[in-house]
Image (cartoon, rainbow, N blue to C red):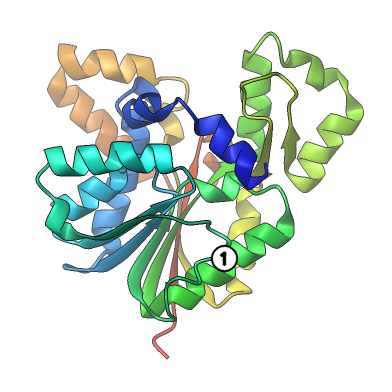
């Protein structure tokens, strides 16, 4: 998707995007992601959240005591973020809230941050050169010893969503469309108002990709893992049996790195480390 197409896709979706991580599917993703962040981040880190939209993760990070710079392509989403940040009383924990492109972080000097989150941009970058620019920029703005947290969507997630949507299933009968997705990770869709281009990854390609830019892979998790397709059941359980619900979330997190389930997770979370020098 072009930058303008991404902006158009998210136009008018601000509140929906804010609420996404409180939905049945989003709540599991948020729980696994925040547990992973908490396990790796050092106290009081300076963090760039690029593509952070309305600020759900940025606000959580600020609440944990980190200093956050929130950036996104969409000014509309950032306006929602400003409101939510103010409501949370966390304005002083934000260094900046600014429009920026994940492929061009030139407004920030080298070695500016202890950690960079990029939890949305990469699956909006079907062009390999754009993904390379985004990875290179993450590494550039990281301090030595810094951490990168990057989200992806697996190829099979795009296949599953296509199968689930009646007006998109015809793609499955088009060999060219299918080969393009399976071989290159390039997803296309002409249905108006939908995700019309994207990049799907094979999990085993992620560590080698970032290694080219100087990151050592520390972790790769499926952020819904064994709960994929069961999120509504889990949300019901949250009210009906909170103790079992917490035990289920613990199990989802404990098994989230199992290689046998990564490709069927809705999203993946990569954690990488920049060398100390």
Q: Quadrant of the N terminus?
A: top right
- Would residue 54 appear left or right of 262 to someone viewing this image? left
Residue that sits furthest to the top in the current view = 166
- Report x, y in % for residue 101: 53, 56
Q: Residue at x 53, y 39 (%)?
A: 261
- The image quadrant that residue 17 belongs to is top left
Question: Depth check: 276 or 119 in front?
Answer: 119
What secondary structure is marked by label 1?
A: helix
Which quadrant does the C terminus fall into?
bottom left
Point 62% across, 15% down: residue: 164
Residue 64 in sight from this viewpoint: no
Question: Looking at the image, how many numbered discs can be counted on the residues?
Answer: 1
Residue furthest to the bottom in view is: 277
Name the residue nearer the viewer: 111 or 104: 104
Front position in the image: 40 or 261: 40
Image position of 195 with respect to 74: above or below = above
Q: Measuring from the top left, give residue 24's x and y in whole percent.
A: 35, 21
Q: Which residue is mark 1?
A: 135
Q: Residue at x 17, y 11 (%)?
A: 240
Quarter-of-image position of residue 48: bottom left
- Residue 239 in the image: state x and y as whole percent: 17, 14
Tell me if 89 is positioned left or right of 248 in this view.
left
Direction from residue 30 to residue 227 in the image, left or right: right
Residue 241 to residue 65: above or below: above
Q: Which residue is depicted at the point 26% across and 69% down?
A: 46
Q: Quadrant of residue 30?
A: top left
**Residue 185 visible in the displayed image:** yes
Q: What percent of the width, then of the height, locates residue 5?
A: 63, 37
Q: Is residue 149 left or right of residue 104?
A: left
**Mark 1 Cα shell of 10 Å, populated few (<14), some (14-19), many (≥20):** many
């Amino acid at each position: 998707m072009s930058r303008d197409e991404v902006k158009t896709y998210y136009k008018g979706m601000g509140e929906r995007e804010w609420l996404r991580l409180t939905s049945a599917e989003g709540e599991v993703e948020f729980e696994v992601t925040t547990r992973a962040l908490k396990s790796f981040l050092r106290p009081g880190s300076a963090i760039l959240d690029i593509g952070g939209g309305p600020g759900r993760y940025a606000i959580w990070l600020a609440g944990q005591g980190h200093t956050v710079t929130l950036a996104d392509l969409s000014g509309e989403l950032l306006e929602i973020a400003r409101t939510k940040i103010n409501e949370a009383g966390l304005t002083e924990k934000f260094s900046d809230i600014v429009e920026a492109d994940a492929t061009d972080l030139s407004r920030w000097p080298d070695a500016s941050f202890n950690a960079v989150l990029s939890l949305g941009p990469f699956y909006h970058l079907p062009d390999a050169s754009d993904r390379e620019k985004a990875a290179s920029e993450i590494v550039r703005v990281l301090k030595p010893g810094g951490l990168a947290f990057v989200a992806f969507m697996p190829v099979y997630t795009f296949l599953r969503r296509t199968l689930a949507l009646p007006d998109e299933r015809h793609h499955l009968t088009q060999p060219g469309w299918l080969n393009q997705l399976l071989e290159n990770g390039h997803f296309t869709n002409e249905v108006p108002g939908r995700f019309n281009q994207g990049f799907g990854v094979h999990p085993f390609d992620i560590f080698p990709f970032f290694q080219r830019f100087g990151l050592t892979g520390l972790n790769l998790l499926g952020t819904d893992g064994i709960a994929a397709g069961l999120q509504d059941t889990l949300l019901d359980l949250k009210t009906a049996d909170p103790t079992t619900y917490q035990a289920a979330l613990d199990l989802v997190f404990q098994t989230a790195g199992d290689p046998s389930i990564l490709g069927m997770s809705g999203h993946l979370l990569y954690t990488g480390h920049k060398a100390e020098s």
